[in-house]
Image: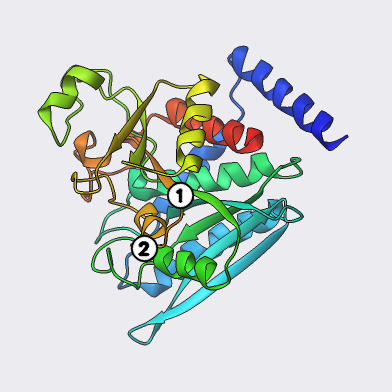
């Protein structure tokens, strides 16, 4: 009966998308982006008040939709920081992690980096509510991804990934939403770490990218294949060595380091968005229609996994 309900639901969702009707809502997406970015303080590592305000907003939305919400607290230099975790389909043994960081680098709004990824989590929470699932889905909003804590044990994603390893949980894999809202259709709007990649992917920043490391896990390969098969948005798949600049520049790196399969979904960050880590990273620069399609692709892939 559950399989029948799942198939019927996914078929209905597919028909909606084929008819040009997105599952995610651009009005709601804009509201979340505004709530996350239009604040009097900046949600960086030095301002725990701003981070706590953001965490409270995320928590309130998660509690509307999730089966369970958990605050993972930890201390750095005498200050408390929080990961916010929402769980769905808790009757299932194996789990998939979908994560995005809610802190910013310095004094800037961080609309693409990474209010866009967090907004993706919030819309996924709404879409996953009461959805029959074959895997447990944990949506995790991380703190302290940005400098000065990037690549340290103080990253929220390090704390979370290590906690999964410590309890020997059955993790299917992890998906990182890192900057998913910036698109450009102009020639030469897309750069690469290696110029030779232009011939393969083109020079227009009009696609979303599924980033994997070489010899990645079966989970990452399967997720990427199923995501591309949804056909909801132009998608490119990139597989390369971790030594290539940018391939591990987000929270998925900690899951790789602890032996979990993981991939990053991204608009390619500074290779396309020149507002990266600058005050120009604001909502008006984002393409909310294509951002909604990125989220729809994640939802359809998760529910079919």
In the image, which disc is placed on residue 261?
Answer: 1
Tell me the mark number nearer the camera, choosing from 2 and 1. Answer: 1
Q: Nearer the viewer, residue 109 or 93?
A: 93
Mark 1 residue crowding within 10 angstroms, few (<14) / some (14–19) / many (20+): many
Give residue 39's position: percent from left, percent from top.
40, 57
Can you say which quadrant of the picture contains the N terminus? top right
Judge whether residue 302 can be spotted in this image.
yes
What percent of the width, then of the height, locates residue 231?
51, 19
Q: Is residue 230 left or right of residue 269?
A: right
Query: Distance from label 2 to label 1 (Cα)?
Result: 29 Å
Q: How is the image coloured?
A: rainbow
Q: Quadrant of the C terminus?
A: top right
Residue visible at 51% across and 36% down?
223
2 or 1: tag closer to the N-terminus:
2
The part of the image, by quadrant, that contains residue 244 is top left
What residue sits right under mark 2 in the picture? 43
């Amino acid at each position: 009966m559950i399989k029948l309900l799942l198939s019927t639901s996914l078929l209905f969702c597919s028909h909606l998308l084929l008819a040009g009707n997105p599952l995610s809502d651009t009005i709601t997406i804009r509201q979340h982006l505004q709530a996350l970015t239009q604040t009097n303080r900046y949600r960086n590592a030095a301002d725990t008040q701003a981070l706590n305000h953001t965490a409270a907003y995320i928590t309130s939305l998660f509690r509307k939709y999730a089966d369970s919400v958990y605050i993972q607290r930890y201390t750095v230099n005498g200050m408390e920081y929080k990961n916010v975790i929402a769980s769905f389909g808790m009757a299932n043994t194996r789990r998939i992690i979908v994560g995005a960081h809610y802190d910013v680098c310095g004094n800037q709004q961080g609309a693409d980096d990474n209010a866009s990824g967090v907004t993706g989590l919030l819309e996924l929470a709404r879409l996953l509510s009461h959805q029959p699932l074959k895997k447990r889905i944990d949506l995790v909003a991380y703190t302290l991804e940005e400098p000065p804590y990037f690549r340290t044990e103080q990253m929220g994603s390090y704390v979370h990934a290590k906690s999964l390893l410590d309890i020997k949980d059955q993790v299917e894999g992890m998906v990182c939403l890192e900057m998913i809202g910036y698109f450009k259709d102009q020639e030469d709007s897309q750069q690469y770490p290696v110029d030779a990649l232009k011939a393969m992917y083109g020079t227009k920043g009009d696609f979303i990218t599924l980033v994997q490391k070489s010899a990645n896990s079966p989970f990452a390969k399967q997720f990427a294949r199923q995501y591309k098969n949804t056909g909801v948005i132009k998608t490119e798949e990139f597989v390369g060595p971790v030594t290539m600049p940018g391939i591990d520049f987000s929270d998925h790196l900690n899951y790789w380091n602890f032996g979990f399969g993981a991939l990053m979904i991204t608009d390619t960050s500074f290779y396309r968005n020149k507002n990266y880590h600058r005050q120009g990273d604001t909502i008006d620069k984002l393409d909310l229609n294509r951002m909604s399609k990125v989220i729809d692709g994640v939802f359809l892939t998760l529910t079919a996994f």
